[in-house]
Image: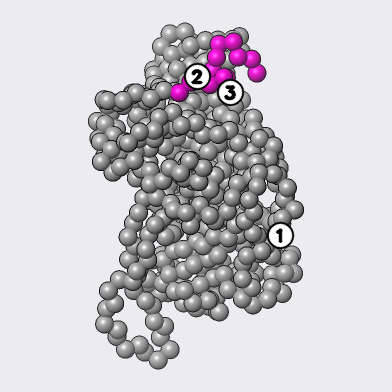
Amino acid sequence: MAEPGPALSGAEEVQPAPGDKEEAAPAPKKRRLAAGERYVPPPRKLSTGVSFGPEHFAETSYYFEGGLRKVRPYYFDFRTYCKGRWVGRSLLDVFSTEFRAQPLAYYRAAARAGRLRLNEEPVRDLDIVLKNNDFLRNTVHRHEPPVTAQPIQILVENDEVVVVDKPSSLPVHPCGRFRHNTVIFILGKEHDLKELHTIHRLDRMTSGVLMFAKTVEVSKRIDEQVRERQLEKEYVCRVLGEFPEHQVVCEEPILVVSYKVGVCRVDPKGKPCKTVFQRLSYNGKTSVVRCLPRTGRTHQIRVHLQYLGHPIVNDPIYNMEAWGPGRGKGGKIDKTDEELLKALVEEHRSKQSLDILGISEEDLNSNAENTDCGNSSDGTKSVQVDPTNENSCPAEDTKDPEKNDTAACLLSSDPSLETLETNKEPGSCKNQEGQTGDRSWEEKDPLCVECKTRRRDPSPRELVMFLHALRYKGAQFEYRSKMPQWALEDWEE
């Protein structure tokens, strides 16, 4: 019942794996329950798979509008087992202390509508005390942020691998607020490519070469090359200013500041890393630079370029005023981490561009650390993706310093929360086929914050960052994409 926004969120949610079959574990002998004691069924045994199937792809459909790929809102079940820290606490207490993105009126209305279930039974009383192995389900009306309408180009497909040229703004796999607007889902829905094994990831805003294995054996073989650092990785980017003509090596350690917002910085306490840079061209304002990451830390290329004083031209994080006059050059940031995060969020909020960070106001309200799936390393890295968990990125313990009451105001002032009829079944938002931008088909869900909120769509230009994975070379393969238009020597903005 974890959700990246309007309800429960967090990195620990449990969802049925694509193709999984839920089956009860062998039932232990039941002990006699004390008077009034509630029975909790044993945990389910999941047969984990690796792919998403037709039933998942059929949840909703795409439409295209203004150069953007959009997902029609749909109903979705978030599921989780009771966390250890919840045992002995009431649902009401858990909602009020850990999931404050919504007012308690929302959860009461969701219970009356039959959308909250405990061990597959409707929750009638939020004062119910949680026990170990309790299984919670929350049905939500889900909205996904738009991504670029640029198609995924398949570079190579054979018996062993699928290699694609990933557009900017697309996450690799379901995570956070993204599910259907991901490479994995688009390949399955539009190219009939299923049961793919994720070998590595790219930042959501990074474009370029992305590899998938078709079999476990191939995945393990390439994983071994990753561990032995036998892979050569080459990226290209466009940065501000005149980058030095000579080769530049940066070995500054990098520390993750926030997984939720997706921010890192150079810090002596960070992880060691190394990037080699070589200028390719300079047009009087910006430089095209070849990047050779020797390690694969989160945002490594972007953070190192910021440190060198040449951030990527349109980097929505590391080329922002929030970093101060020098924009982080030389690691000089006259702010605490909390002040920096607040300034970055406020700068994007003022531009109505939080979606570009992959977060929403509701994410900022929640105590749970809902990580953006785009915050993976810039370099190749062996990745084990848990198909049962969309928020499979690592979580941190720090709580977000921001607290915004936008969602609470929207919902607490809505009389439908108090009058929604009992057991109203979700289903007012029907899936419609077609490629038009007409939204007249969409009925509003009475409990959905997103249905009540008008957001500015990003422009296709805002969804492109000038960082591209150009080439990956291993012991027995080499895959390369075309040089992006913005990296050509005669390109003009």
Q: Is residue 484 magenta?
A: yes
Which of discs 1 and 3 lies nearer the camera? The answer is 1
Query: Disc 3 to disc 2, how far (Cα)?
Result: 17 Å
- Please identify the dominant SS of the magenta region: loop
Disc 2 target residue: 483
Q: Place residue 476 in its image quadrant.
A: top left
Q: Amino acid at mark 3?
A: Val
Q: Is residue 347 magenta?
A: no
Find residue 443 and name its label: 1
**Is 79 above or below relative to 132?**
above
Q: Place residue 318 in its image quadrant.
A: top right
**Do the residues bearing badges 3 and 2 touch, measured as CB atoms within 8 Å?**
no
At 48% from the left edge and 41% from the top edge, which residue is drawn? 191
Q: Amino acid at mark 1?
A: Glu
Find residue 313 and name its label: 3
At 69% from the left edge and 44% from the top edge, which residue is drawn? 436
Front residue of 308 and 358: 358
Dot placed on the residue nearer the N-terminal end, 1 or 3:
3
**In what element is the residue under mark 3?**
loop
**Residue 118 appears at what percent x and percent y?**
47, 73
**Is 290 above or below relative to 115?**
above
